Amino acid sequence: MSADEAVFWRRRARELEARLQESEETLDAIRRGDIDALVVSGAQQHRVYTLESADRPYRVLIEQMQEAAVTLAPDGTVLYCNRRLAEMLGTAQERIVGRPLQPFLREEDLPAFDRLLTNGGRGEIGLQGPDGRDVPVYISLGLLPLEGERPMLCGVLTDLTVQKGHLRELSVANAQLRAESAQREAAEAALRQSQKMEAVGQLTGGIAHDFNNLLTGIMGSLDLVQGLLARGQMAGMERYVAAAMSSASRAAALTHRLLAFSRRQTLDPRRLSPNRLVQGLEELVARTVGPNITLDVALAADAGAILCDASQLENALLNLAINARDAMPEGGTLVMQTANAEISPALAAQLDMQPGHYVTLAVADTGIGMSPEVAARAFDPFFTTKPIGEGTGLGLSMIYGFAKQSGGQVRIESQEGHGTTVRLYLPRHPGTGEEDETAPVPATAPRPGHGETVLVVDDEPVIRMLVVEVLQDLGYAALEAADGPSALELLQEEGRLDLLVTDVGLPGGLNGRQLADAARAGRPGLKVLFITGFAETAALGNGRLEPGMQVMTKPFALDALATRIRAIIEGE
């Protein structure tokens, strides 16, 4: 044996002796229960420790835990696990200890698990046992450095199966609730649509009933007039003409109430004092309600100014006074009062109005009152508790529409047997409102024209014919057009033009306001009178009319139209 061979075998013998010594120490440790086994993974060796080596009293506790406990080598090899992990995986502990945990994980969770092995931490992963069961768990791993040895990772795995099941049940329950909610919303929408259609039916039925009565009066009177004219008789004609005019006036009042309810009436808002307005109505209301009802007027000395249509407000208060009178057939007390009110955001939400400063005008009575069901429907169009023929059911709906169109609100407080209070809320405006409002000009006979030229634009032939004939009778030169484009052609011609009288709603793609603007582009300062059946606020510029522009609401008396035309031309 050469010297080199002798050296090699001596070194090999020492290595074998060291390994034998280590093996004997390991076997002694296993016998003592300090470790469970020695796991060889490639070129690496891992001692698989039991908890009894350091914390024997806690081994039973760890084995009885509801959570899985595990000790891992840095490469994921299981050095220890309790029985709960074995139960989760559906296999024996000895089939887990000494093997990598990665084969027991879902493939998509392997990258996350590798990060946990490197840095420790928490996360949700899924375990898969030999039977293919998928067990969702929440794992928490922490590094446990060991002196002189490679660090280990200790962790706890919590089974989320029950929680996930509850979440699935909650998801199913939520889906069912959403489906039920959608069905309920659909049912409520169908009910609302049905109620809307019922309201429309009541509205159209009420309109048809009232207009049929009014048209019968008009048509019957005109038939009788035609009969008298055919026979050459003039006696008695005035009576039939007066009857026709009376029915027509009532029809006009009905349409005004409908427009008020729909908030499309043409208003003429001016700043005024509510106290002065109520004082001006006091005598009329007293005569209207009669001597057996005591009228009490309570006016707040500091009541602010309001901006609204004075005539519409007077009509609303008079209507409320008449309702109060009808609610007190045996007599009682009627109170008209004014006050300032500051509406907070919380109260505004309850009253369905904007918060801010308001003036209230209230009409209260000591009459029979209303039930909650009747009070809830009081503002519905054509709803009335009066006998047939004694009320249209448009009074309160008209007041409601007027209040909303004026930027305010109206509310009813009533109790059966204890009377009713109807309170109007109108926005308060700067100033006292004590400025002297323009006094109404008494009606006079229309003044004749002096050869001025007026262009009349309306798509209704009868209206054009009547207006043109009145203008010609008064000495005006009248031009006419049925739509915007035809009127523009006349406006582009040379010649004098003193006034444009136009409907707001016109066919041909050009409304009255657009026509007026185009006319003024070629004829600066041209005076314009809009005539309209309802307040097309968008077409009229949302109520903002330029100087020299005015609006008049249909229907109107032809004498009133002629008077307005003369005043506009003369700049009054």
Image: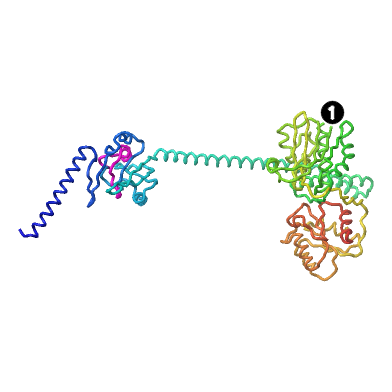
Q: Is residue 27 left or right of residue 496?
A: left
Q: Position of residue 120 (x, y in %)?
A: 36, 48
Residue found at the far bottom of this picture: 494
Which colouring convention does the figure follow? rainbow
Q: Position of residue 228 (x, y in %)?
A: 90, 47
Residue found at the far right of this picture: 235
The answer to if 86 sits in the magenta stretch is yes
Reading the image, the residue beneath label 1 is: 330
Tell me the kind of residue under disc 1: Glu
Residue 465 in sight in this render:
yes
Mark 1, Cα crowd under 10 Å, few <14 / some 14-19 / many 20+, is: few
Name the quadrant containing residue 463.
Answer: bottom right
The span shown in magenta is 73-96
Residue 200 in sight in this render:
no
Name the quadrant containing residue 163.
Answer: top left
The C terminus sits in image quarter: bottom right
User: Residue at 91% across / 61% down in the picture?
Assistant: 449
The answer to if 526 sits in the magenta stretch is no
User: Residue at 16% across / 49% down in the picture?
Assistant: 18
The N terminus sits in image quarter: bottom left
Q: Give 516 or 495, whichever is nearer the viewer.
A: 516
Q: Give 489 or 522, whichever is nearer the viewer.
A: 522
